[in-house]
């Protein structure tokens, strides 16, 4: 049963004006096809106001605080965006549980007042709250706003990150426990949530792969032409090159052991990547950051796409959206084996060691076929936002009648 004709309040970590893609925004847009939706941006906190006072987004929020711009905007059919006219205390790194809870309750009350003001103006009734991992700023909203249902959405193991760890381990567990349902975009995160709430479900991941269609590719990027002309198999990765998430040693192994392959890395580098020995290999090509419409052009040139994810507390539960993009273009894929990757096991070669990458990439090169290409494309295109929201709806109606 799909959630229909409801009023839904969405809170989360990412504001609507974020510069990168956002699960939460995509889910809100899908909700808005059948419901009225209020998307709540995080309010300014004092530390951000102090440290980023010249940032255009902060400047805009300051104008809204002083009523120089409206705080509530209609941004689409049945979809509104709220910029809370309040300032929150910066509390993430407070060590005292009692002090943190006291200040967090103050922050939540400030947020609740702003949300209630918007709810009154929009005449929302009997609303559902969908909380995207906003474990601190939304912690007391179930009590303060009294929704008919509270859904907590987990899509990253945030409490493994230092920024969240100090208070997040305790607070997120309590948040999950009191939610009506917890939904997760990976099987790993769903299992973690089950320890705190029996009404926890894996709901999959939506992905807009409309751009990733081989039939739409009309050209090869200029910086790929000389690489293609070499005639070597192209082993490629698209995404941020961050040592916290990617295993540099896997890439070094491939570069060293297979000089007859070209490795193409598309994305911005962090410092460990910039200073790595990968830059010493002639068969490793760093092409830098590209715009979203350009990414399919680069992916179309790959013979095998890879995701050499390093396995740690931060990454082990991640659902990598790039895998859907790779598969949507029919590309053979080799990726690091994790529990979250189990849903791809039929279509992706899953490697446990750097040596596995060598043998599996070769196998994918040797056994690719038109039939496999079609199977990959069809599978990736089942991971739609519509199906994702359908699963979220199914999880909720098992617990609460709507």
Image (cartoon, helix red, strand yellow):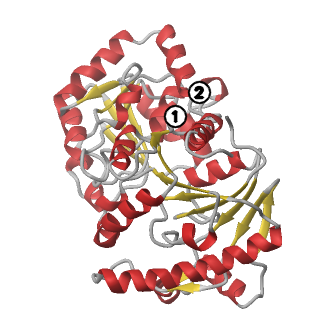
From this viewpoint, is residue 221 visible?
A: no
Residue 290 lies, in percent from the top left, at 52, 49
Determine which quarter of the picture holds residue 368. Answer: top left
Image height of 195 relative to 272, above or below: above
Residue at (56, 39) in percent of width and height: 398
Q: List the residue tagged with mark 2.
A: 381
Determine whether the residue tagged by mark 2 lies in a helix, strand or loop: loop
Determine which quarter of the picture holds residue 69. Answer: bottom right
Q: List the residue tagged with mark 1.
A: 325
Q: Is residue 340 left or right of residue 80?
A: left
Residue 88 lies, in percent from the top left, at 52, 84
Determine whether the residue tagged by mark 1 lies in a helix, strand or loop: helix
Of tags 1 and 2, the one toward the viewer is: 2
Determine which quarter of the picture holds residue 39. Answer: bottom right
Residue 178 lies, in percent from the top left, at 46, 60
Please state which of residues 369 and 396 is positioned toward the viewer in this rendering: 396
Residue 324 lies, in percent from the top left, at 50, 33
Image height of 149 relative to 335, above or below: below
- Which of the marked residues, 1 or 2, is nearer the chain's N terminus? 1
Image height of 275 relative to 141, above or below: above
Residue at (63, 29) in percent of width and height: 217
Image height of 340 relative to 168, above or below: above
From this viewpoint, is residue 278 visible?
A: yes
Please state which of residues 104 and 265 is positioned toward the viewer in this rendering: 104
- The residues bearing labels 1 and 2 have C-alpha atoms spaced at a distance of 9 Å
Residue at (80, 55) in percent of width and height: 78
Q: Residues within 10 Å of mark 1 (few under 14, many from 20)?
A: many
Q: Is residue 161 left or right of residue 353?
A: right
Q: Residues within 10 Å of mark 2 (few under 14, many from 20)?
A: some
Please state which of residues 92 and 296 is positioned toward the viewer in this rendering: 92
């Amino acid at each position: 049963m799909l959630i229909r004709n409801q009023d839904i309040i969405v809170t989360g970590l990412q504001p609507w004006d974020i510069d990168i893609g956002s699960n939460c925004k995509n889910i809100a847009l899908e909700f808005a096809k059948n419901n009225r939706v209020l998307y709540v941006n995080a309010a300014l906190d004092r530390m951000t106001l102090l440290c980023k006072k010249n940032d255009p987004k902060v400047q805009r929020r300051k104008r809204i605080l002083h009523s120089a711009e409206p705080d509530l905007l209609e941004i689409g059919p049945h979809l509104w965006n709220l910029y809370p006219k309040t300032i929150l205390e910066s509390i993430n790194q407070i060590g005292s549980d009692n002090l943190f809870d006291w200040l967090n309750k103050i922050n939540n009350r400030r947020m609740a007042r702003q949300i209630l003001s918007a709810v009154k103006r929009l005449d929302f009734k009997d609303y559902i709250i969908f909380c995207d991992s906003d474990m601190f700023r939304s912690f007391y909203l179930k009590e303060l706003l009294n929704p008919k249902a509270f859904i907590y959405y987990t899509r990253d193991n945030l409490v493994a990150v230092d920024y969240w760890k100090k208070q997040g381990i305790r607070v997120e567990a309590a948040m999950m426990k009191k939610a009506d349902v917890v939904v997760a975009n990976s099987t790993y995160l769903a299992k973690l949530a089950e320890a705190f709430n029996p009404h926890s479900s894996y709901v999959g991941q939506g992905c807009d792969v409309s751009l990733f269609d081989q039939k739409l590719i009309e050209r090869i990027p200029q910086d790929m032409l000389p690489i293609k002309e070499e005639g070597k198999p192209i082993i490629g990765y698209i995404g941020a090159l961050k040592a916290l998430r990617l295993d540099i040693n896997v890439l070094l192994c491939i570069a060293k052991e297979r000089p007859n392959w070209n490795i193409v890395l598309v994305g911005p580098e962090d410092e460990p990547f910039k200073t790595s020995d990968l830059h010493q290999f002639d068969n490793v090509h760093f092409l830098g950051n590209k715009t979203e419409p350009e990414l399919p052009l680069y992916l179309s040139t790959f013979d095998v796409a890879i995701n050499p994810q390093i396995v740690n507390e931060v990454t082990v539960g991640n659902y990598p959206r790039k895998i859907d993009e790779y598969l949507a273009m029919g590309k053979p894929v080799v990726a690091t084996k994790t529990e979250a990757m189990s849903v791809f096991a039929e279509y992706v070669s899953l490697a446990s060691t750097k040596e596995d990458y060598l043998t599996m990439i070769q196998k994918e090169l040797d056994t690719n076929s038109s039939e496999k290409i079609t199977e990959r494309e069809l599978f990736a295109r089942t991971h739609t936002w519509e199906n994702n929201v359908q699963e979220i709806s199914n999880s909720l109606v098992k617990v609460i009648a709507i």
